[in-house]
């Protein structure tokens, strides 16, 4: 951020254990808004046009979207085994549909964007995109990676590496 925006970010952890980086700069905000075609309303976000058509940018975008808006969980099924899922949740159905297209472009197939759902105590319509199954989840990680330390540990745990502290992308063994 210092190299690109000329400012050191302030990095904090909120009460929920989420890391946040802040830059107090109108110039930086204007630059980011222009480059990333950013609109403040989540319901109107789009995938920036410079991402589409470049495989490395597409992979990086999917990885970053997963790190910020996705999760990986193990859910007990009615058949008493655990099912692994990658779950994206977002107020913007169109961006999830485009994200689904990008993921499928790299060979990972799954269902449609579901929703809208309304969380208890909220009036925001939410949509979700879910990848089911250990093999598809590991394929997602091999293809897109993650920079989120807790998510990397979960993926590596799926591979049988319970004590892994690896924090590099695309590190799943074949």
Image: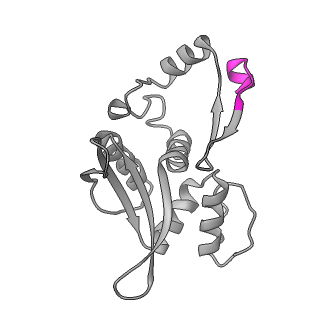
> In this orientation, which residue lies closer to the viewer: 50 or 123?
123
Can residue 174 be seen here? The reply is no
Left or right, 118 with reference to 130: left
Range of magenta residues: 1-10
Residue, x 60% and y 67% (percent of image)?
Answer: 155
Residue, x 50% and y 50% (percent of image)?
Answer: 66
- Residue that lies at the very extreme toward the front in this rendered image: 121
Whole-percent x, y for residue 41 in the image? 37, 28
The quarter of the image holding the C terminus is: bottom right
- Eyeballing the image, is 143 above or below 23? below
- Eyeballing the image, is 119 above or below 133? above
Which image quadrant for residue 4?
A: top right
- Residue that lies at the very extreme toward the left in this rendered image: 116
> In this orientation, which residue lies closer to the viewer: 117 or 53?
117
Which image quadrant for residue 10?
A: top right
Residue, x 53% and y 45% (percent of image)?
Answer: 68
- Residue that lies at the very extreme toward the top in this rendered image: 27
Residue, x 69% and y 37% (percent of image)?
Answer: 12
Left or right, 19 with reference to 70: right
Whole-percent x, y for residue 93 in the image? 29, 43
């Amino acid at each position: 951020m210092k190299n690109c925006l000329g400012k050191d970010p302030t990095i904090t952890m909120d009460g929920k254990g989420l890391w946040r980086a802040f830059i107090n700069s109108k110039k930086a905000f204007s630059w980011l808004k222009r480059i990333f075609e950013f609109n403040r309303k989540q319901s109107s976000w789009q995938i920036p046009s410079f991402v589409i058509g470049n495989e490395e940018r597409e992979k990086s975008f999917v990885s970053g979207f997963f790190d910020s808006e996705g999760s990986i969980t193990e859910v007990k099924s009615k058949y008493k085994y655990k099912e692994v899922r990658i779950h994206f949740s977002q107020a913007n159905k169109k961006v999830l549909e485009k994200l689904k297209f990008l993921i499928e472009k790299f060979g990972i197939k799954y269902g449609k964007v579901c929703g809208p759902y309304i969380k208890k105590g909220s009036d925001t319509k939410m949509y979700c995109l879910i990848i089911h199954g250990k093999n598809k989840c590991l394929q997602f990680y091999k293809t897109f990676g993650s920079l989120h330390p807790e998510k990397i540990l979960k993926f590596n745990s799926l591979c049988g590496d319970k004590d892994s502290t690896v924090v590099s992308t695309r590190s799943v063994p074949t």
